[in-house]
Image: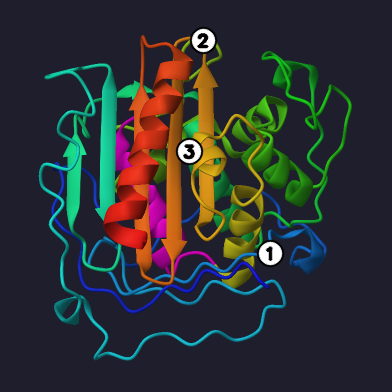
Amino acid sequence: MALTLVGAACAPAPARAPGATATSTPPPLATRAAASGALVAPPAARLTPTSLVVQATPAARVPPATSLPSPTLAATPTQTPEATAESVEAPALDGLLEGLLPDGDPTYGLVLEDLGSGARTAVNDDRPFPSASLYKLGVAWLALREVDAGTLSLDDPLPIEDEDTVEPEPRGGFKAADTPTVHEALEAMLSVSSNAAAHAFLRVLGRGTVNQEMDRIGLTQMRVPDDDDSEAVTSAADIAHLLRLVLTSPELSVSAKEVLAQGMSKIAPPDALRETLPDSVAILDKTGNLDDSSNVGALLQTSRGTAIVVVVDSGVNPGAARAVIAQMGQIAYHTLLE
């Protein structure tokens, strides 16, 4: 079985807080000398053996998407114009999150969204929180746009320098003087959440360029700091929007989206969604953990539909946060996916 993401023709997104919006023609990316070497797709054998197919959605704020590939890069059909959001019945999500958190709890930001219909419910979704490792999904987005533009190649080396090793590195990550390829660094940054790979990309791409790109695609809260003395921030709404773009945006090639799918299908523990949801649910996610938080941005799917689940938090026990994540997953499953 293959892990496949299929983005379909989409209607415009529901409105969110005012801010920068995506443009139909992306501005030039960071200008680095074009690297030699062909763009290569990741090997199929390394992908998780599940299937994830995206339905039509009104949630994207960019033009309709091309397909994300199967591991064999076989052609995948898009939906017909008739299969639009108008033909998708919106589930009733209002009130689903009531009781999940103490009344008015400011320590969590939540989003639950049905991708097919655009139905959505949220708590504190525009409030900024420390992103932990969720910012790495935005870094991966920009790096893969550079790959598509030809200013990076997946085969390029990405040397890990001393300045890139300022945070503890998880098992499976890198140390100073390692020279992973861009492809290897992307996979490690998404799966085991390599900090060294993330800092190397921030150095090569430029922190300001990353923030400009987040503005351009409509993320109003996600920011990486100018230096290592501050922390990256984001909001639940921004992560939900970025996950929609991962599925629906035409700004990434099918090969680039396959790299994202590969990394997001092999997240290292702890992962409360993978630990509690049934095997029938296909999961692509990015987790982030700090001493006082546990965050996740996830795409969940069964044959019934696709759900976006986002939990960001701060000042909480990480175990308690993972319990909230697990409950969000169960709500999504029983309401939208079972």
Q: Secondary structure at mark 3?
A: helix
What type is the residue that disc 3 sits on? Val
Between marks 1 and 2 in the image, the one whose residue lies nearer the viewer: 1
- Choose the circle earlier in sequence order: 3 or 2: 3
The residue that disc 1 covers is 49
Membership of 239 in magenta stretch? yes
What type is the residue that disc 2 sits on? Asp
Q: Which residues are magenta?
A: 234-252
Membership of 197 in magenta stretch? no
The residue that disc 2 covers is 291
229 over 44 or under it: above or below:
above
The residue that disc 3 covers is 210
Residue 29, how many percent across, how many down?
A: 51, 52
From the image, give the main secondary structure of the stretch colored magenta: helix
Q: Secondary structure at mark 1?
A: loop
Q: How is the image coloured?
A: rainbow
What type is the residue that disc 1 sits on? Pro
Between marks 3 and 2 in the image, the one whose residue lies nearer the viewer: 2
Residue drawn at the location 36% of the way across and 33% of the way down = 311
319 over 136 or under it: above or below:
above
Between marks 1 and 3 in the image, the one whose residue lies nearer the viewer: 1
Instruction: Let me know if residue 131 appears in the view.
Output: no
Question: Mark 1 touching mark 3, by CB under 8 A?
Answer: no
Residue 194 left/right relative to 221: right
Residue 158 left/right relative to 83: right
Determine the image quadrant of residue 244.
Answer: bottom left
Residue 76 left/right relative to 72: left
* Quadrant in which the C terminus appears: bottom left
228 over 192 or under it: above or below:
above
- Choose the circle earlier in sequence order: 1 or 3: 1
Residue 81, how many percent across, how many down?
A: 27, 90
Residue drawn at the location 41% of the way across and 52% of the way down = 243
